[in-house]
Image (cartoon, helix red, strand yellow):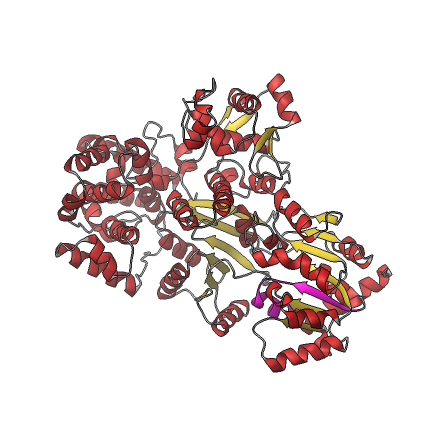
Amino acid sequence: MTTDPAVLYAKLKEFFGFDAFKGDQEAIIHNLLDGKDTFVLMPTGGGKSLCFQLPALVMPGTAIVISPLIALMKNQVDVIRGFVEEQNGIAHFLNSSLNKAQIQEVRKDLLSGVTKLLYVAPESLTKEENVGLLREVNISFYAVDEAHCISEWGHDFRPEYRRIRDMVRTIGRAPIIALTATATPKVQNDIQKNLGIMDATVFKSSFNRPNLCYEVRDKVDPEKDIIRYIKQNPGKSGIIYCLSRKKVEEIANLLNINGIKVLPYHAGLDARTRAENQDRFLMEDVDVIVATIAFGMGIDKPDVRFVIHYDIPKSIEGYYQETGRAGRDGENAECITYYSYKDILKLEKFMQGKPVSEQEIGRQLLMETVAYAETNQCRRKMLLNYFGEDYPKDNCGMCDNCLNPKPTFDGRKEMCLVIRLIKSLPEHFKIEHLSMVLSGHSNAMIKSYKHDSLPLFGAGKDHSEKFWSVVIHQGLLLHLLDKEIETYGLLYVTDKGEKFYEDPYEIRLVEDRIFLGKGSDDEDDEDLANDKAAMKGGGGDATLFSMLKSLRKDMSRKLNLQPWIIFGDPALEDMSIQYPITFEELHNCQGVGEGKARKYGKEFIELIHRYVEENDITRPEDFVVKSAPTKSANKIYIIQSVDRRLSLEDIADARGMDLDELLDEIEVIVSSGTKLDLNYYIRQVIDDDVVEDIYEYFKSEATSDSVEDAMKILGPDYEEFEIRLVRIKFLCEIAS
């Protein structure tokens, strides 16, 4: 079917109120009107929905739109009915939420030819009665929305999406348009192959969202950081994503207690409450929604000014889609993610018990997320590369790494070593495997391939496995290396890489990011510029930060203590933001307990007081985060139970926690300055010599209180649980 462009523009104005198409919309619509299969790869906010809604309204018959979420269907049907007010039956949805009377209404409008758009869930498409109904309908085309759900390598895989091709054959073939906001080359290939549209015309828009600013922060006291950020941006609309329903409720409750207009959204709420909370956010009755990842899919709220990830997402695709809900009006918006490697370990634990192939895919996607979080390179460049797109500039000016660039080094020697290793292997391998070979670390897979006996095994042992992973990632960005599409994650050397290897030239690389939350502390370099670059949010007073580090250094020498034991960098940075001049104010800085404030704080308070007066600084209002009652109740119960010398297992059972969660709570209690005597329990579960070794490590060797660093240095003979317990003992006896 061909349509006069003038007619199409008239319909665009009539139905949607627009005078012109955006990007590839017009070409996509003409391709579909010509009866051709179509693949649309367009970022969130690019106008995907119009690409199937407008042709559905002008073509004879009914378009079947396959969509994954009931809330998304309802939202889009309401929008279409708003465009064509005189005919409610023009758009319907068919899913499990309808009663018999509503289903009959849908059936009547479909068979009479009134309905132009029918939204169905993939599960509904497989029901026998629905298949029989749709066989009687003149179908104009099928639109597969959120098509990434087809691929196991996509961020939201739905097995039922795999059956769409068979159902289309059963109902009757018509042109297919597949649409997604996130797809790597591998996922795109999966979608086309599974739908049987390998010959489809592909329309790929740029994934660059130049108005979004990307930032990854250390996950150190994120609740306080989030509250501060929202209060510094009053009235702005935002979404906070958490991975669990429990955390959604906790964060929403905490924000509410602290005077922020907020509502939760997750699958544990009944459908009516979810719909009401969503509508109140859209109508601006509340400023913030705290949600699990399902929220926001297909919801058109243009003025979301920030998206915060309390938990690191499981994949780059999920991260990109969720951050893409910010700034859809083209105005600047911030995307802040809190990162701790501890969260990655938890996500890996959740994968246990799943099929091996699913675990492998999940782990590979997770490692891409880790690389993104820990990189010192331009985040925009890395994101776009992940989706098969080049970003031409070296500095985007809109991410934390570009705003605070890190030093670089000439990496031609290191890159040549990587290429030499890949070329020497008859098979292809993933980043992790190659990094371990170069750093000289072995595992079962390396031994099975006998790669521990290769001449290049340990050739880069002067650097860590993580360093080599970063070099390889940068090789991908420079197109010296690439990944095979069919065997996702396996690396090969490109033609450009071969030429580089034959005639190496200077390439500027950056080392991986070291997180302050893990206690990195370069005490040999007090240069102000480095201090400024080291500050995680860039919002503190760099001059004061440098002065505080100098004071800490002097005190550490006098007291013969590691500097981090006095105050960690996150505490100093918070002081450089809050300018505390009383013990109470100092206690409210992150990582500063009451005991630590009294023990080490006098000189810091005096220095800050002098600095504030000499520089005529107006201090921010006192910032105190009110605690949720449930957390206070937990704290009191744990303190009383430890005083009564109950086992940690019994305490955890009584509060409905596992041991990891209980240790999390105890660590929070101890970091706030409360001393707990766990020696009675430690003596029961850990050998004395093990306690002595771990304690001595924290006292003499550690440059931070990081459990992850301790595990690496102490080695596999020491369990994480043991290290955490002895760390708590050390903090109570020495560092608080």
Q: Is residue 5 left or right of residue 212?
A: right
Q: Residue furthest bottom?
A: 101
Within the magenta stretch, is there residue 714? Answer: no
Which residue is found at the position 44% from the left and 56% from the top?
Answer: 242
Occupied quadrant, residue 654 = bottom left
Quadrant for the N terminus, please: bottom right
Which residue is found at the position 74% from the left and 69% from the top?
Answer: 135
| Residue 468 visible here | no
Residue 378 lies, in percent from the top left, at 54, 38
Occupied quadrant, residue 97 = bottom right
Residue 144 lies, in percent from the top left, at 67, 58
Front-lying residue, 54 or 649: 649
Q: How many marks?
A: 0
Residue 293 lies, in percent from the top left, at 50, 57
Is 307 located above or below residue 511 in the figure?
Answer: below
Q: Is residue 507 left or right of residue 114?
A: left
Quadrant for the C terminus, please: top left
Front-lying residue, 215 or 360: 360
Is 332 located above or below residue 523 in the figure?
Answer: below
Front-lying residue, 675 or 501: 501
Is 508 located above or below residue 333 in the figure?
Answer: above
The residue stretch that appears in magenta: 61-76
Q: Is residue 422 left or right of residue 556?
A: right
Residue 91 lies, in percent from the top left, at 69, 72
Front-lying residue, 79 or 408: 79
| Residue 508 visible here | yes
Which residue is found at the position 65% from the left and 26% from the top?
Answer: 496
